Amino acid sequence: MNGPVLEVRDLNVWFDGPGGRDVHAVRGVSFDVRPGDRLALVGESGCGKTTTVLGVLGLLGATASVSGSVRVDGQEVLTGGDAAMAPYRWGDLSIVFQGALNALNPVRTVGSQIAEVLPRDGRVSRRAALRRAGELLERVGMAARNVAFYPHELSGGMRQRACIAMALAGEPRVLFADEPTTALDVVVQAQILELLDRLADELGLAIVLISHDLWLVGQLCDRAMVMYAGRAVEEGPTEGLYTAPRHPYTRLLYEATPVLGADRPLRSIGGSPPALDVPLAGCAFRSRCPDAEDRCSLTEPGLTPVAPARRAACHLTDRTP
Amino acid sequence: MNRGLDLVLRRTAVALITIFCAISLNFLLFRVVPGDAVSNLARVPNSTVAQQQALRHEFGLDRSIGVQYVAYLRELVHGNLGRSFANGQPVSKNLGEALGNTLPMVLLGTVVAILAGIATGVLGAVRRGTRTDRALTVSSLTVYALPAQWVGLLLLFLLGGVFPSGGRVDEFLIEPSPWQHTVDVLWHMTLPSLVVGLTLFGQYALLTRTAMLETLAEDYVLTARAKGLSTLRIVRHHALRNAMLPISTLIALSLGSVVGGVVLIETVFSWPGIGRAIYSAVTSRDYPMLQGAFLVLTVVVVVCNYVSDLIYLRLDPRITV
């Protein structure tokens, strides 16, 4: 019972590129999700966070090829294609997408979109399904009568709540949340965050949050994996990542995050992530790294333990304590 | 529901105003063409100017345009479209018969084209980039590019021996039972309906494919896939449901124009419908028939647009104006 719900090992994703130059978007990512876990995937845009999750869920299109291993309750689901993943979709693993307006079908009511994923034990009448959908909406702080509303009739925050209600409909054990608050103002952001926090506690949900926002991650998650150029560069408890980052990228990402009232200058990270359609030599971050040395251009560092429950992929971790 | 009623009333008003404008333009059109009906009749040898004047007076053509217009409207309201010069029958009776012959033929072809076109387009979009998709697209494009009358002649040439080559009924069928009559009409209808269907099929298939490719790439389809719904359900309830918005508009528009566009097809197959009525009215300068036919065609187009608006209203809850 205490084993991981989800085990991801050495996940690799390639996209077909023009002229046969395939883009290696996710490079050997591994992580576990146990019941009740609060894990975050952190990094700037294009670092492969969303691609990782879509790859795990088998939702990448035909232009992507995925390799590695994804196990749900010890059962391999990646190699079996859609048929192997299908029974776990929504029932065990569900997702809340970024930008809830587009994630909901504009021409169908919120209620019908929730009702269509309710577990059908025997014949559930349409009326009963809608009542259950209403209960789910109440659970996320909306009125039950909102089942009859169309997505465009709800505000952004309400739509995101409806998406969360929809994600709960299958009674999942792991909830992926892909930048769930990006399009929302700060007040609503905090409400959604609180909601996710409460639901995770009440339902024993494991949450995998995808975000570039370190503040958000610190609020909700107790463990984080920092990603750069399709690879995990540092992972560990969120506390330690901020106070004592072991990878230069984590440190710079933290310094680039605005914190109200903090007495430190805001710094951006110069340059941009490397192109992933050519093989990388050495550390992917070295061109933007202030501490880069000669050895960084020779071999790519692997994730190595740097402290209890902490791992980082940097050659320089042997230097700083 | 209030919104719906308000919109229906608005659309109805717009449709009625459009028909009124069309009627007025229709009236004007036949007054601005050089030579009135009498000058045409009066080409009879030995007709004197006095006789022409008498005729003009009899038809009321010597009165002012305004008076004629009011008289025209008054008679129109009473359902009087005048009498055909060619056979002396009331125009409304002639046109009613012609329309009664055209509508079943056109509807049969259109319904088949709609069903086949949507099915083809959906299949092409779901199998995007495969051989099936390419074959379907190429054949749709080919059919779309062929002129209707040429397809008609080709079919006559190929299948003329199998199906009747012209007319609506077998003139030599003596006292047919209603059943025999229906079968006979359907048998005669096959080729012209096939031509109507073929010429419409291409555009329906191509538009459906494009619309489906667009909706299949939407976020809500990704949501639907993440929900673990079956492909059939994703296509029907999410992708096609949204793709039906542009498709329904095209169907209504093409239905309106196809009734007027059957002139060539009906001429090729000697189908006694509205197209052939127009053709023979033009060749015999039967002004009342032409005027009546134009009126019927404009009303058909306006009604189709009106119905399309109502369907759109039903399909898309976001419409508010």
Image (cartoon, rainbow, N blue to C red):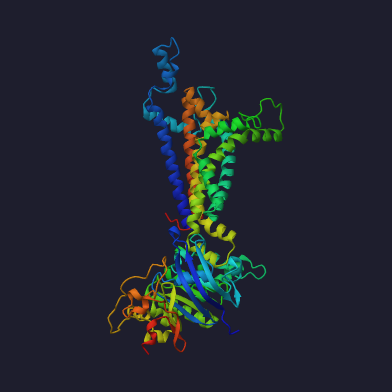
- The image position of residue B177, as x and y in percent, is 72, 32
* Residue positioned 30% across, 73% down in the render: A270
Location of residue B139 with respect to A164 vertically, above or below: above
Check the image and report above or below for B221 versus A40. Answer: above
Give x and y (percent) for residue A244: 37, 87
Q: Is residue B262 left or right of residue B20?
A: right
Q: Is residue B233 visible?
A: yes
Which of B2 and A179 lies nearest the eye of the viewer?
A: A179
**Closer-to-camera residue (B186/B209):** B209
Residue B246: x and y, percent? 48, 51
Seen at 39% across and 87% down, the residue is A318
The answer to whether residue A63 is left or right of residue B164 is: left
Q: Which quadrant would the N terminus of chain A be assigned to in this image?
A: bottom right
The answer to whether residue B310 shows anywhere in this view is: no
Between A9 and B314, the one lying in front of the other is A9
Residues B173 and A196: in front is A196
Q: Position of residue A49 (x, y in %)?
A: 45, 72
Number of numbered discs: 0
Give residue A47's quadrant in the image: bottom left
Q: Measured along the vertical axis of the image, is residue A31 above or below residue B246?
A: below
